Image: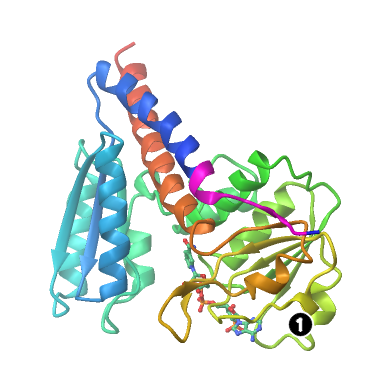
Amino acid sequence: MAAIIIDGKEIAKKTKSEIVGQVQEMKTQGMTPGLAVILVGDNQASRTYVNSKQKTARELGMHNVLIEYPESITEQELLAKIDELNNDENIHGILVQLPLPGHINETHLIEAISPDKDVDGFHPINIGRMMTGQDAFLPCTPFGVMVMMKEMEIDLAGKHVVVVGRSNIVGKPAGQLFLNKNATVTYCHSKTKDLKEHTRQADVVVAAVGKAGLITADHIKPGAVVIDVGMNRDVEGKLCGDVAYAEVKEKAGYITPVPGGVGPMTIAMLMYNTLKSAKNHLSKLQNSNL
Ligand code: NDP
């Protein structure tokens, strides 16, 4: 039987419709959630992502600022801009679009962003909070995956989740969030011997690698949930994931398509985090007026 398609576009739409109402509500209290995006250089893919984030922020009624720099910008100049944004009352979320040119140290920039405005959820403070189960800004892509699980009412307690990929921004936090939901988690990566042996045992497979067609029907247990985070171009230049969608969807229980799966959720969760940051700011102001 063909898998149930997890429609990321629809779930993202629902999430955004909840956010837009809350943005309007905040505006009546004199505050507009504000997002600042820093874009360095002329990477076409980065520009597309940034445009999409800005468009969504505008649609949701948020204040949004794009700060663009040429590739020749220095790390010091970027750090000074982040410092300025950390102190800007109208900005609640700061995002540095990755990747950055080689002469700039990503870690220095991420760590310079105030953890209270780190709406990407990449700052070590937020990662530490997530790991210890405290309130945190969760990294948008894995957060979006968890919202999809919730919307589809997929029970995770005791389930075996195999995450393929262990990057700091997707694979590692995804595994942690599943663990927080009481799943048993296995991580696979480029040094894993016999990937199939692991993925075939999984109730849930999360593919976050960046290799088109890596996960085939042979990797999947019948009825498993398959989450495809990958964003690749196929030989015809069309967007595709890490999963051989046509064959896997005949065997899986649930599957996310690419496009229209995890991608739209990532942006929706960025907006959610920006709203959350603005709400935190508002309640701090209100408490200081008590
Ligand atoms: P990275 O390149 O940082 O990480 C890729 C991971 O895959 C690494 O951990 C690597 O292992 C592992 N890997 C590579 N080859 C294999 C293999 N043959 N078998 C098993 N594991 C392997 O990528 P990201 O995590 O940043 O992104 C992953 C994918 O998700 C990309 O396609 C990216 O475009 C996409 N993406 C999609 C988003 C969305 O919104 N949908 C958002 C962010 C990313 P090792 O650690 O050993 O090198």
Residue 256: x and y in percent read 61, 58
Ligand 1 quarter of the rendering = bottom right
Quarter of the picture containing the C terminus is: top left
Near mark 1 (Cα within 10 A), the count class, few <14, some 14-19 or many ≥20, is some
Look at 73% across and 46% down and name the residue there.
Answer: 181
Tell me: 176 left or right of 211: right
Nearest the viewer among 290 and 213 is 213
Distance from mark 1 CB to nearest ligand 1 atom below 8 Å: yes
Look at 42% across and 42% down and name the residue there.
Answer: 273
Quarter of the picture containing the N terminus is: bottom right
Outermost residue to the front: 1
Q: Quadrant of residue 88?
A: top left
* Res 92 visible: yes
Residue 94: x and y in percent read 30, 51
Q: Amino acid at mark 1?
A: Leu
Tell me: 147 left or right of 281: right
Vertical comparison of 108 with 262: above or below = below
Q: Quadrant of residue 223?
A: bottom right
Nearest the viewer among 97 and 199 is 199
* Res 121 visible: no
Look at 18% across and 55% down and name the residue there.
Answer: 66
Helix, strand or loop status at disc 1: helix
Residue 261: x and y in percent read 54, 56
Vertical comparison of 223 with 7: above or below = below
Vertical comparison of 235 with 110: above or below = below
Give the magenta part as a residue range.
2-11
Look at 20% across and 76% down and name the residue there.
Answer: 42
Vertical comparison of 143 with 134: above or below = below
Residue 281: x and y in percent read 34, 30
Residue 9: say if magenta. Answer: yes
Residue corresponding to mark 1: 195
Labels in figure, total: 1
